[in-house]
Amino acid sequence: MTEQMTAPIAAARPSLVSIAVALLYLSCAFYLAAVIIPIAQADDQILEPLAKILTLLNNVVACAIYCLIIWKAAKGRNWARIVILVTAVLPLILRIPRTSPNPFADSPSAMISLGLRIVGIALLFVPPSPSWFRKPKTG
């Protein structure tokens, strides 16, 4: 008699995690819109063309890195879930003593992005999401 060796079946991703991931990707898209639209409309006398390019490049790279972290969270990496939380909370703490207006932060796209991000992060931390992130992954 031979024993058939089978790998343990990985737990299916909870639907709340799938929704959270979709909301976080969407928040990234709205964030980019909140940055790109005002920069594209800015007068060249106010914002130099090189500054426009560097600002856009910086934000696109930051969003790409954030999307990579979201992707890792979608794969069940607990560290990615924590990084997403920290990257959301830290800027909020730093904005408390807000002394200068931020033209990007108050746009409708930025507000939508923030709302999607808050809901998405919350969904990563409510049951059954935490237990799924803590389960050993296979493959």
Image (cartoon, helix red, strand yellow):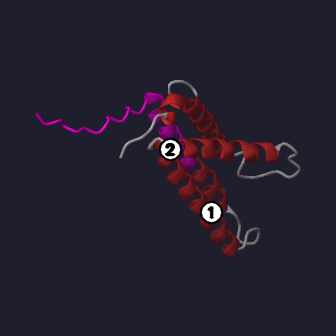
Extreme residue in the left direction: 1
Judging depth in this view, the residue of 67 and 111 nearest the camera is 67
Indicate left or right for 27 with 108 as reference. Answer: left
Q: Which amino acid, mark 1?
A: Ala
Residue 43 spot, x, y in % from top left: 71, 67
Instruction: Name the residue: 57% across, 61% down.
Output: 60
The answer to whether residue 133 is magenta is no
Residue 51 placement: quadrant: bottom right
Which stretch is magenta? Answer: 1-29
**Dot 1: within a 10 Å radius of its alpha carbon, few (fewer than 14), some, or many (20 or more) residues?**
some
Does residue 63 appear anywhere in the picture?
Answer: yes
Judge by depth and name the residue closer to the eye, 2 or 16: 2
SS state under label 2 = loop
| 126 relative to 48, above or below | above
The percent position of residue 109, horizontal first and vertical second, equals 62, 45
Q: Residue furthest top?
A: 127
- Residue topped by disc 2: 77
**Residue 83 in the image: x percent, y percent?**
62, 47
Q: Quadrant of the N terminus?
A: top left
Q: Which residue is mark 1?
A: 40
Q: Is residue 27 visible?
A: no
User: Taking 112 as reference, is 99 above or below it?
Assistant: below
